[in-house]
Amino acid sequence: MIRALALTCLCVVLCACSRPSTETASAEAARRVVTFAPNLAEIMFAVGAGDRLVGVSAWSDYPRTVLELPEIGDAFTIDQEQLSLLQPDLLLVWESGMPAHTVDELRQRGYRVEAISTRNLDAVAEAMLRVGELTGRQRSAAAAARQFVNELEALRTAYVDAEPIDVFFQISARPLYTVNREHFISEIIGLCGGRNIFANLDSFAPSVSVEAVIDRDPEVMLAAANAGDEAFSEWSRWPSLAVDRYRNYFLLPETIGRGTPRLAMAARSLCTALDQARSNRGATQ
């Protein structure tokens, strides 16, 4: 899918370049946008539409420019007065992050609402293209999406013959959550030659038991840096685990959990961690 999308992005770029004034041609292009998730604010800037962003949700922190913009609350608690004052002509909401009844309410109030998915790597690239289309920045969005896809494809090519290694990604320790095969984190694990030990679970971000992790005996454990240095402290209680024998515990950049173009950077860090894990495994065998 990623390879096919890369070609699609390239075609969009070439088509855009062949049409005059593509970036500003659409009379319906949104000019006052409010985002309801941090990743959507970041995507706005990534596609060259940051100048059209007038309001953001809580926890929006990248790029630093967004810290200067008014906050409108979050997907669950919206400051309706502030939102009205901003006079947006487009609201971007995270498809899986805002309750359906809230989306319906916003539309009933007369707002134009667009739900954006960043569920997997293809969806992130598609989100960039869609935001570019909505804001009249098709050409710059297509270029950014193509770069994102190409960076991931370069990693896929580099690790196509990498020695497989079993990986557990820990979203949180208490309660214990992970990701299934449909999550972009699991895709990145596979891209780097790893095997997500819970890929076959039905839930997108399932809760798992300590016993289930022990039974699958991962060789590597990963978590985002914001989990803190104590993220893996509980696992030292089971020294028989392969991951503890190899000391293959790695904290990754926080961007690993945010569906934006910076996932390409996080993917490089994850691949590097798995390289080190393979080395550690080899040194103890």
Image: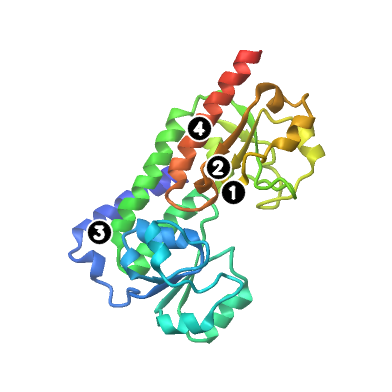
Task: Say which element carries label 1.
Answer: loop
What residue is rendered at 33% in x and 57% in y?
141
Q: Decide if residue 129 is in sight here.
A: no
Residue 273, percent from left and from top: 54, 30
Work out how far the residue at label 1 is from the one at label 2, CA to CA, in angstroms: 7 Å
Amino acid under disc 1: His
**Image coords of residue 65 (percent x, y):** 37, 61
* The furthest residue to the right: 211
Label 1 with label 2: CB-CB less than 8 Å: yes
Closer to the camera: disc 3 or disc 2?
A: 2
Residue drawn 48% across the image and 36% down it: 269
Q: Which mark is residue 16?
A: 3
Q: Residues within 10 Å of mark 3 (few under 14, many from 20)?
A: some
Task: Please report whichever mark, 4 or 3, sits nearer to the chain's N-terminal start.
Answer: 3
- Looking at the image, can residue 107 be seen? yes
Vertical arrangement, residue 54 with respect to residue 178, above or below: below
Q: Quadrant of the C terminus?
A: top right
| Cα distance in 3D space between marks 4 and 3 | 34 Å
Amino acid under disc 3: Ala
